[in-house]
Amino acid sequence: MGRKLLLCLLLLFYTLRITAQEENSRFSIGFNYGFGSEFNNKDYTFENQFYKAQLYYKLKETKHFQYEILVQPEINFAKHQLLNFYFVKPETPDYQEKRDEYTQLKDVREYVLNLGFLIRKPINKNCSFYALGSVGPMITDTETERMSKGFAFADVLALGFSFKVQKIQFDIRSEIRHVSNAGLSSTNAGYNTKNIEFGISYPL
């Protein structure tokens, strides 16, 4: 699975590099690493770390702002545990067995394809601030008391800072992430986390 995903990404980047050369380098590619955890609560724990490939396309540039769109394939490694077993109510079928199962620490893996829109405010030639919003489909491999296994969505709002060293751009961003399945499955409480990301990108 991992090798196939890597091969697909390499082919995608190669194709887009050829396209970018023809369109005066509106494209950049990059890689981000991030981590985070749930907002403080008494019901559950959720700690995650994730890796993203980043493809940027500069849509428009005005006197004061730049507008970009992003494609972000992501793999997320998380650990989750139910703390408040009363979250699984007695009217739930086999509720006692499910309480016993869900209160165990679980490894959760998520595969995500985020599509984002970014508004950048340059400070000078090398530094800028930006706001980013993204949403995308996701597959999660583990059922929990908060979300069914399978298809879901990941929504992200972020604020970030970028600076360039020659052609290489470095990024740091803080973000709020919400994961749920939009009611497509029976269990849909989802997760809310606060994350921080570090990234590097390079124009094609």
Image: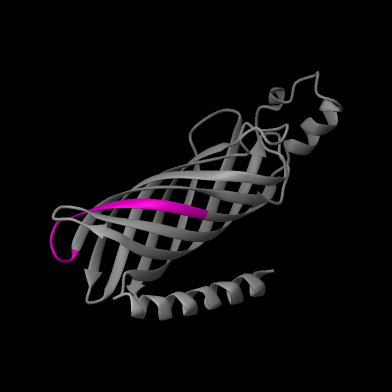
Q: Position of residue 194 (x, y in %)?
A: 45, 42
Q: Position of residue 91 (x, y in %)?
A: 81, 18
Residue 92 vertical position relative to residue 171 in the rendered view, above or below: above
Is 79 or 146 nearer to us in this picture? 146
Q: Give the quarter of the image for residue 128.
A: bottom left
Q: Position of residue 112 (x, y in %)?
A: 57, 55
Which quadrant of the rendered structure holds the C terminus? bottom left
Q: Give the quarter of the image for residue 145.
A: top right
Q: Residue at x 22, y 77 (%)?
A: 166
Is 3 or 144 nearer to us in this picture? 3
Q: Which residues are magenta?
A: 114-126
Residue 24 vertical position relative to residue 117 in the rendered view, above or below: below
Left or right, residue 150 beside residue 98: left
Q: Residue at x 30, y 66 (%)?
A: 170
Q: Position of residue 27 (x, y in %)?
A: 36, 70
Residue 14 vertical position relative to residue 95 in the rendered view, above or below: below
Say whether residue 146 is magenta: no
- Chief secondary structure of the magenta portion: strand
